[in-house]
Image (cartoon, rainbow, N blue to C red):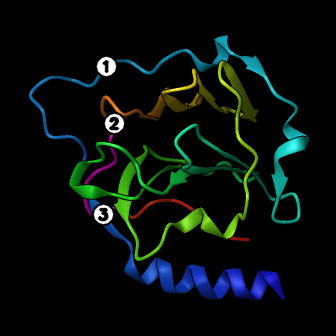
Amino acid sequence: MLSRLVIGLMSAAGAAVMSVPGVATADDPPPLPNVNAFAPVKTSEYAVMDNQWYAFSTPDGITCVLQRDGGYGCSGAIPAAPGGANMVSGGTGAPGFASAAAPLFSVVDGAKPLPANTRISYQTVSCGTDGVMTACVDGRNQSGFVISPAGSYVVGDRPSGIKPSVRIG
């Protein structure tokens, strides 16, 4: 039943998703932080969606997921996101910002908070927080994103017009 509800919600949300260009600056974004320097958490404690996702919430209440198929992302009120985007995601390609009618990962009710100075990792993707900033990095291509009140950005921008790579269920 939950799977059908999620599929229906994601179909509706997917239809509303529109690409938002990355941060428009003359300078390159700062490098991604080394989230692998943070202490790991026990991944199994964050399993949701019949163990297909590992979900956590950031210190500022954004919901993030790592999918077993390699996709990863966060949705919610992303601070300083370009164009007011409410989602950032990555997968086999470079990450990017997008907007959806509703936060895409809100289907994960009550995601467990990721404590400060910890990380969660699955395969080549690691996400971590220092208690203010949250970052996700894909070791395959050294791309990822940072969510921070000081500015949210991606490293390894996907070309404009390419939709986020998130699979539901």
Q: Which residue is mark 1?
A: 30
Q: Residue flagged by tag 3: what amino acid is it?
A: Ser
Residue 15 percent coordinates (x, y): 42, 83
* Majority secondary structure in the magenta region: loop
Report crowding for label 3: few under 14, some 14 to 19, many 20 or more residues within 10 A (C-alpha).
Answer: many
* Residue 43 to residue 109: above or below: above
Which numbered disc, 2 or 3, marks the residue closer to the eye?
2
Q: Residue at x 12, y 33 (%)?
A: 25
Q: Residue at x 29, y 42 (%)?
A: 80
* Residue 107 to residue 98: above or below: below
Residue 31 percent coordinates (x, y): 37, 18
Q: Residue at x 47, y 47 (%)?
A: 93
Q: Which residue is mark 2?
A: 153
- The stretch of residues the image draws in magenta is 155-162
Q: Between residues 11 and 92, which one lies in front from this camera angle?
A: 11
Report crowding for label 1: few under 14, some 14 to 19, many 20 or more residues within 10 A (C-alpha).
Answer: few
Q: Residue flagged by tag 1: what amino acid is it?
A: Pro
